[in-house]
Image (cartoon, rainbow, N blue to C red):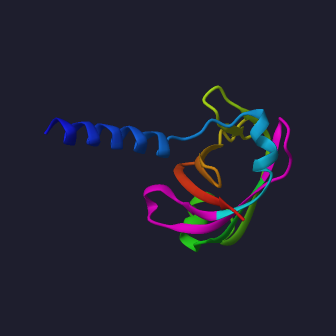
Amino acid sequence: MKKIICLIVIALMIASVAFAAAKITAKDLAGLKGTWIGSLDFGTRGYSTPCTLEILNDTVPVKAKLMLSNVPGDMASSLGVMAGRNEFNLDDGQLTSQGTIFWFSPEGEKNIFEVSMRRENKLNATYWFRTIRGNALVKKK
């Protein structure tokens, strides 16, 4: 019985290390530069769309472009964007003490986009855009 408990504890420890998010540092930026593809959800609204995150440089401030392939019409009208394809420039990305890259929109809009490293070739993103909080998961192309 003690051996089974020990094996379960060891398995849980290994799993927690395997699934823990890695911190992004300045040294990681060169490897993050490039194209990332995946899906972005619109929070509790029940929609998602294919997305592309293009990280354009490997120094702070980090510049990126987020492209949403297919924003549904009723979702677009509630967000004040066009239906279909949309592009957003992310300028002035900063590294945080939590090991993420954080973009904050110009004054007045208060939109945020934050990226964390999930695994070597995967990034998690959390965003707040106008009234919607959602997530994205992208993989290096």
Q: Is residue 47 magenta?
A: yes
Q: Nearer the viewer, residue 69 or 75?
A: 69
Left or right relative to 34: residue 10: left
Looking at the picture, how far across and down is residue 103, in whole percent?
71, 40
Q: Quadrant of the C terminus?
A: bottom right
Q: Nearer the viewer, residue 134 or 60?
A: 60
Q: Residue 9's x, y, as percent?
A: 29, 37
Position in image of residue 73 (x %, y %): 59, 73
Position in image of residue 34 (x %, y %): 80, 57
Question: Residue at image x 25%, y 36%?
Answer: 6
Which quadrant of the figure has residue 39?
A: bottom right
Number of marks in the rendered image: 0
Residue 122 quadrant: bottom right
| In the image: residue 47, left or right of residue 36 | left
Magenta extent: 38-64
Query: On the rendered image, what quadrant is the N terminus found in?
Result: top left
**Residue 62 highlighted magenta (yes or no):** yes
| Residue under the image location 49 percent in, 67 percent down | 47
User: What residue occupies the far top of the structure in this picture?
Assistant: 97
Q: Which of the two residues, 115 or 127, is positioned nearer the viewer here?
A: 115
Question: Which residue lies most toward the left here?
Answer: 1
* Along the line of sight, the residue nearer the viewer: 8 or 81: 8
- Residue drawn 67% across the image and 29% down it: 96
**Which residue: 54% across, 53% down?**
135
Give the vertical position of 83 relative to 126 (above or below). below
